[in-house]
Amino acid sequence: MKKPLSSPSVKRVKKSFWNFLINRLTITVILILLQFIALSVFLLRLNDIFTYAYPVAQILSVCIVIWLVRKNDNPSYKIAWIIIILLIPILGTAFYLLWGNTPLNQSRLRRIPPIPMDQLERAPTATRPLYKRHPHYRRLVQYLYGISEMPVWEHTGTEFYPVGEYQFEAMLTDLRKAERFIFLEYFIIEPGAFWDSILEILTEKAAQGVDVRVMYDDAGCMGTLPMGYAKELERRGIRVHQFNQFFPMLNTYLNYRDHRKVCIIDGNTAFTGGINLADEYINEKERFGHWKDTGVRLYGEGVANLTAQFLQLWHFCEKEPFVDLTPYLPTVQAPSDGYVQSFSDSPLDDKNVGENVFMNIINNASKYVYITSPYLTLDNEMLTALTTAAQSGIDVRIVTPGIPDKSYVYAVTRSYYAQLIQSGVKIYEYTPGFLHAKMIVSDNHIAVVGTINMDFRSFYLHFECGTVFYRSSVVEKVKVDILDTIEKSHPIDAKWLADNTSWIKSIYASVLRLFAPLL
């Protein structure tokens, strides 16, 4: 006979259920679902209400398809929408206008102010010394400077963290030393050992007169922070912005998320990489086995680019012009550890900076390219770059998670394995758990550590950042870390594919892959 629930147990169950019901994420999902149902019912009955509605909708659908074909969007993205519009003309057209990459949906974020680059240009950047010593880097350096307006720097110390726990300790140490300002920009913040330890320091520093600012992505924190949390931070003396605040309405500008992870201290020290401010990133809490993530610390002139990127979005949220960068520029020159060039990527233009940086490294490799990414949803350009490199004799290796956080994305990731392996690319899955690190390294002389996944969201829909290291000690450390990760991973080969790819899974993955740009 089952023991009846005790009164405290019943209360806990009721409290958990009530918390679930009033959770902002739950409420948002319900409201959007209700809007979706109401809109679908209305559109399906449109012809009953207006006699000529359906023929007009069909003509509009054809016009939208023609417009899509002419647009300068990624072909995979356009194909997914064209299929939807042609299959369900009325609903598909309406959903594209609401959720598609249209000027109407981008307009809300078009006010992002430009970075006052003339102030950075007056600083002693390392462009000329790098061109003179290593002219083969010129193309990538000039691309990043011309597109994202971010110069390359010398006089910067670097440190690489192979797990989040190490970065956590270093962040606490450096945050306690802050004297002028602290800027935090993160996709996810969640109360726990990691964030609570940082918040305690932020509160103390704000009371001392330090300029403390926190910017977090509203959608990214929807399931981790309670409603009104920004006001709680403000009560502690912290200036705060919820980037692109999420309203439960059917529109696509909510797709444009701030996926960056940056901590800047006094303009002289910065931390960035894949690590968010939540306990799973330091393995204080287990979600999907061991959480493998990486980050880097910059100290010196190279911090300037990350500071400029933060202030650009901060001033957008403030709805005021970005005028003076000078008070926030580095005041120290560290012993140089090669050259560093942090860059940003925005979804509001047709310049896919993150993807282009990766492809530049892949296309210019002469020996090897090693990549880690939690997600692998590739467009034709990236797929061609990887397979061509492998077919040209380059040692191309990619490491993905062994335990997924999103099963449908995992299915899409695995759908690329066969084509990559047949071309000579080596694939590994991180056996101990979830690999969240976003890195690429090539030929012992160049590496990127940042927030950029190898998927459509990072390449086309998110605000992202990364740091390129040229002839830095970080390059060797990234290479060693990836090789060490491979030792803890299982290789994907033809036998594994045969044992793990049934025809049902194959069809399911193919359908998901077709709509991967919309996931």
Image: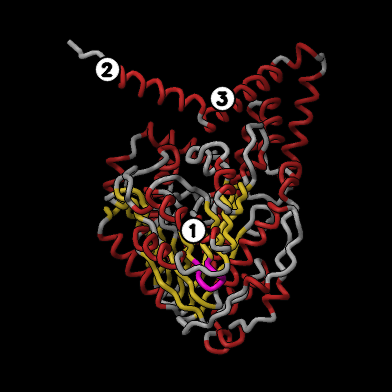
Q: Amino acid at mark 1?
A: Glu
Magenta highlight on residue 267: yes
Q: Earlier in the sequence, mark 1 or mark 3?
A: 3
Q: CA distance from mark 1 to mark 3?
A: 39 Å
Kindly identify which residue carries mark 3: 30
Disc 1 secondary structure class: helix
Instruction: Give the colouring mode of the picture.
Output: secondary structure
**Left or right: where does residue 38 sit relative to residue 228?**
right
Name the quarter where the N terminus is drawn.
top left
Kindly identify which residue carries mark 1: 204
Q: Please identify, in this view, whether the residue under mark 1 or under mark 3 is nearer the observer.
A: 1
Disc 3 secondary structure class: helix
Tell me where the magenta segment starts and ends, as one range.
Answer: 265-270
Residue for point 66% across, 72% down: 327
As rendered, which of 496 and 516 lies closer to the eye?
A: 516
Does residue 230 appear in this view?
yes
Kindly identify which residue carries mark 2: 6
Q: Earlier in the sequence, mark 1 or mark 2?
A: 2
The quarter of the picture where residue 294 lies is bottom left
